Image (cartoon, rainbow, N blue to C red):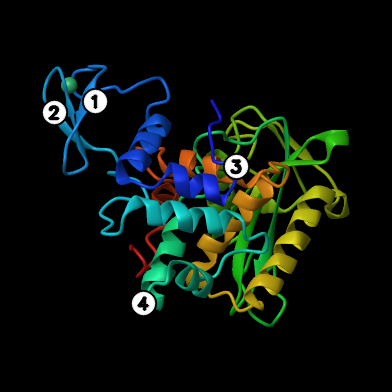
Amino acid sequence: MEDYPRNLAELERRFATEEACRKYLAGLRWPDGFRCPRCDGTAAWPMADGLLRCRVCEYKLSLTAGTVFEGTRKPLWMWFRAIWWVVGQKNGASAKGIQRMLELGSYQTAWAWLHKMRRAMVRPGRDRLRGVVEMDETYVGGEKPGKRGRGALGKALVAVAVEDRGDDGIGRIRLAVVSDASQESLAPFATLTVEPGTTIRTDDWSGYGTLTDVGYPHTVVPSHELKIAHRTIALLKSWLAGTHQGAVSHQHLDYYLDEFTFRFNRRRAGHRGLLFFRFLQNAMMIEPTTYRQMVKSVRGPKPSNHKG
Ligand SMILES: [Zn+2]
């Protein structure tokens, strides 16, 4: 099931051709075998242009449509090497590093790749948090401390959801930039990231006042008891400060949060090859609606110039 290269030499040997890369991606996209989206047929021919053709109804589809690899002009083996490198950077990957590693002429290309990769790192909407979840929010960036609920100049507000695994400590996390700490922002964040019926623990901030209404048993505790949320926030802040010298633009904060979440949720995965495998698994998941689109639809559109 979890089939991945053990080291760089194996990666290079195994994924030397486009065909080998495509075969691997197809296995991740259709773990139970190919399924034609039109006729439900179970076999397809690979075509020279990288498309697949259903053997029953002849429908043509692209293996990579809707994924991070859609429309790329660079060979997949280059992507595989870039991903291998990115997942191995414990303190976060930089565009400069990718540029150097792949010997790309353009810094911008490297930067665009890195941002595409970050976007593929998290797949909320699936695998929502469960068990007992702690929620809190924190301001990131800017210089002045922010006042809760009112928005603070120069700062971005990040909502935080953390699984409480009891004696096993912190489970998985979800993070998202929210426009403010109102009920209109925090309840949708819960809905998108936490399985309905899960107990959510927060402090008595009014922004969490509608959690019960949207389907979550809600426990209110004094703020200082939100230990795992606070611990996660501290780790996030030190990661941002260390990796990005604290200079994280709001525009790209979503991407950094995705990278942090990916690394955090797989901090015990151990093997680099397994991270590589998980990354590609995420990357090949085709979402009918992406998380960011969902967030945008609840908080209104936000200008963005990195559609890449
Ligand atoms: Zn078909």
Instruction: Tell me the CA gap for discs 1 and 4.
Output: 39 Å
Which marked residue is nearer to the observer: mark 1 or mark 2? 2
Q: Residue at x 38, y 32 (%)?
A: 29
Q: Residue at x 46, y 45 (%)?
A: 13
Residue holding disc 3: 6
Which marked residue is nearer to the observer: mark 1 or mark 4? 4
Of labels 1 and 2, earlier in sequence is 1
Of labels 1 and 3, earlier in sequence is 3
Q: Quadrant of the C terminus?
A: bottom left
Q: Amino acid at mark 3?
A: Arg
Q: Residue at x 42, y 47 (%)?
A: 294
Q: Residues within 10 Å of mark 3 (few under 14, many from 20)?
A: few
Label 2 residue near ligand 1, CB within 8 Å: yes
Q: Quadrant of residue 260?
A: bottom right
Residue holding disc 2: 59
Instruction: Tell me the CA gap for discs 3 and 2.
Output: 36 Å
Is 220 positioned to the left or the right of 72 in the image? right
Query: Contact, CB < 8 Å: mark 1 with mark 2?
Result: yes
**Is residue 238 shown above or below 40?**
below
- Counting from the top left corner in percent of width and height, residue 4 is at 54, 37
Q: Amino acid at mark 1?
A: Pro
Query: Contact, CB < 8 Å: mark 3 with mark 4?
Result: no
Q: Residue at x 66, y 69 (%)?
A: 240
